[in-house]
Image: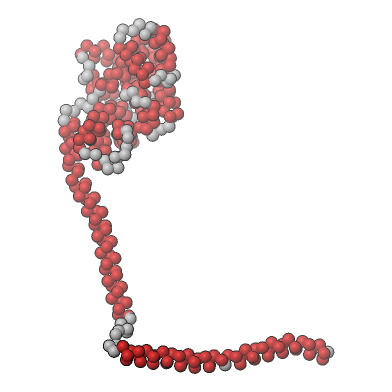
Amino acid sequence: MNLETFEIRVLPTKNKLFRFAFRLLGSSEEAKDVVQEVLIKVWNGREQMAEIQNMEAWCMRITKNLSLDRLRSRQRRATDPIEQGMEIKNETLTPHERTENHENMERITEMIAALPEKQRQVIHLRDVEGYSYNEICEILELDMNQVKVSLFRARNAVKEKFLKINAYGL
Amino acid sequence: MDSKQIEQLLEKYWNCETSLEEEQQLRAHFRGEVPESMKEVANLFRYFEVQQKQQVNHSEFDAVVKMKIKQHRPDGKVIKLFYNYGRIAAGLAVVIAATYFVRQEVRKAYPTEIADTYSDPRLALEETKKALLMISKSFNKAQKEASRIKVFNEAEEKIQGKSLDEPKDQTTKI
């Protein structure tokens, strides 16, 4: 792989990698560091990666592993700096949308952040990024059953929350 | 899409039976106006869409990565090449040194005895004959000595014969 193919095939995945790392780490600064680390890792290991078909899934997998390494070394929860996350996310919205959506979006962010790690990963990859089940298996190194069960549990946890909100008129 | 279809699709979504296309349809649907009862679900799908637009908020990001990559490249390769060739060279050096010393030792232990001693073929023939004769002479001598072993054989046979006869003698005595 030369620099040109790297720029075409690997570099454009940076936003996806960033979002995934951010979902796991909850900090945009750290997510950015992880993405940088991933890209450099991919470049340095490019000789061995020549035969990899799905470069994007491969990058996502490295992102997951590096993010989890960081989480473990810090021994802290990824859900802490939610505020920071909101800030970045809202940069892409107009001021009008921002005020309208802020509360709702924050609530959903909290809901998803409260999910167990695996469910959070799966719901992010499927519902935010729109990956196929096969790709999710590849990224998370899980089998199809585990992925489907995690997604089912994640979606149902969200649904339960909605039902509660509706029932109590929150 | 009417509300019934949407409800069916949503039910499928909660059960994780929707395809990616159907999930995109849901997203598209919830972009528009929705009834009050669907507000929460609509927010969820809008949330997913908003999240997907999130980007690395660093204008220099690509440049930084490319710079780091370029820094990494040269010395990474040089070290690797040196490492591989270095290993081969070191291995060869050890083998060559070892064979050299072993050869020297062997030469010291067994000085060369066989060398061309005769330049005249006839003389060489004479000398060879002499040597062969000497061998055959001593061979004959050895054969003569070896024939004496027969004496032992005979003695052994006699003893065996006797030992076979003995019990008979004893029984007759008794």
Q: Residue at x 41, y 14 (%)?
A: B9
Q: Is residue B29 visible?
A: yes
* Above/below status of A19 relative to B127: above
Instruction: Name which quarter of the figure residue B47 lies in.
Output: top left
* Above/below status of A127 relative to A14: above
Q: Quadrant of the C terminus of chain A?
A: top left
Instruction: Name which quarter of the figure residue A66 lies in.
Output: top left
Residue situated in front as seen by the camera: B83 or A51: A51
Give x and y (percent) for residue A154.
40, 23
Q: Quadrant of the N terminus of chain A?
A: top left
Give x and y (percent) for residue A163.
41, 13
Q: Residue at x 34, y 25 (%)?
A: A131
Q: Residue at x 32, y 13 (%)?
A: B28
* Above/below status of B167 relative to B7: below
Give x and y (percent) for residue A52.
32, 37
* Above/below status of B100 relative to B69: below
Give x and y (percent) for residue A67.
31, 34
Furthest toward the front, the residue is: B122
Q: Residue at x 32, y 84 (%)?
A: B113
Q: Is residue A168 visible?
A: no
Residue situated in front as seen by the camera: A165 or A50: A50
Instruction: Name which quarter of the figure residue A143 lies in.
Output: top left
The colour scheme used here is secondary structure
Residue situated in front as seen by the camera: B2 or A124: B2
How many numbered markers are drawn? 0
